[in-house]
Image (spheres, rainbow, N blue to C red):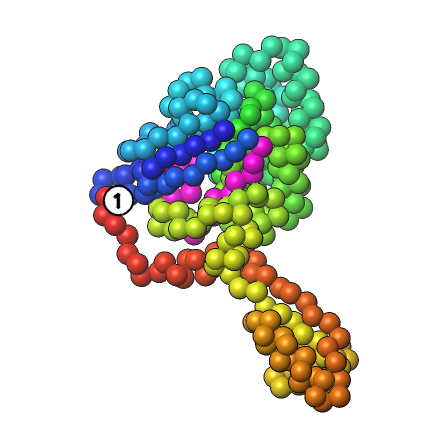
Amino acid sequence: MIEARNLRKEYGDFAAVEDSTFEVTDGEVFGIVGPNGAGKTTTLKMLAGLLEPTSGDATVAGYDASETEMRSHLGFLPEESPLYEEMTPITYLEFFADLYDVPGSLAEERIQETLDELDLEHQDRQLGDMSKGMKRKVAIARSLINDPDVLVYDEPASGLDPLTTNYIIQFTEQLAAEGKTIVFSAHNLFHVESICDRVAIMNEGEIVARGDLAALQSEHGETTYHVYTTVEVPDSVRKNGRWHRVVGTMEAVERTRDAAQGAGGSVADIRTEESSLEEVFLNVAEGHEGEGKSEA
């Protein structure tokens, strides 16, 4: 559904994106994460056909990203999305439905259905009088007015209150369940971890790691074992009536078991904890610090 091959974007002597290559399959949710300035927004804008790559190419829904026909299959949500503030949500969405040549009756049905799904109140209020969260919902509705196969969302919940943020994340999950192919960036790695099938981590314009969470955890994370014993063992602390020890290998778990048995006790519980996406991201980012950035 989406294929990026050696995407590169230069601004003078600076390369904002360097040789990015990845694929997103039909119905997949693909997250792009990284620190500010990593190249996430530039990458998304090249996928949306808003920026021309210096080199490389991207295809979306079978079309080159530069082709006009591609945009009828794409819904794009930029991080900053100014609206026509004198319009109401209904008139604003009708305007964009007309731009996409969506027939009137279908547009009316699609607009109302989407606004209801987004739980947008005060649909007759001017956009300029709406909260940032309500405006964001209208912008999301705009991205769906042409019923696109592919959605490219740049920080869809940026700067919103927790309640609205969670609602938008849940709505994104719903779109994925309906079969939309979604690429999005977000600073909140918990949200990325909760809904993405795969993730690409960018740093200084390059994709430095990619894969599903299990693969990223295996390569860049770590597994810890929380062992609870009925008696004190070396390096353990008292916790909720038991003794708690954290170790990094199964061999250490077995040594803890032996120590507990030797002291006349036993292992009461063992819990495995995997690195979160945030911990994986920090490990990857720290691992690429000081490596330098190639000149354009």
Identify the residue shown where x is 50% and y is 19%.
Answer: 72
Disc 1 marks which amino acid? Phe
* 169 relative to 272, above or below: above
Identify the residue shown where x is 71% and y is 89%.
Answer: 263
Looking at the image, residue 54 sits to the left or right of residue 93; the answer is left
Please state the extent of the stretch shown in magenta in the rendering.
27-44
* 230 relative to 35, above or below: below
Identify the residue shown where x is 58% and y is 25%.
Answer: 144
Which residue is at the front of the view, 248 or 33?
A: 248
Q: Which residue is mark 1?
A: 14
**Rendering coords of residue 12 (x, y %):** 23, 40
Identify the residue shown where x is 56% and y is 38%.
Answer: 29
Mark yes or no: residue 83 visible.
no
Q: Quadrant of the C terminus?
A: top left
> SS class of the residue under badge 1?
strand
Quarter where residue 18 is shown:
top left
* 144 relative to 40, above or below: above
**Rendering coords of residue 166 (x, y %):** 65, 45
Mark yes or no: residue 230 visible.
yes
**Rendering coords of residue 124 (x, y %):** 67, 24
Which residue is at the front of the view, 109 or 229?
A: 229
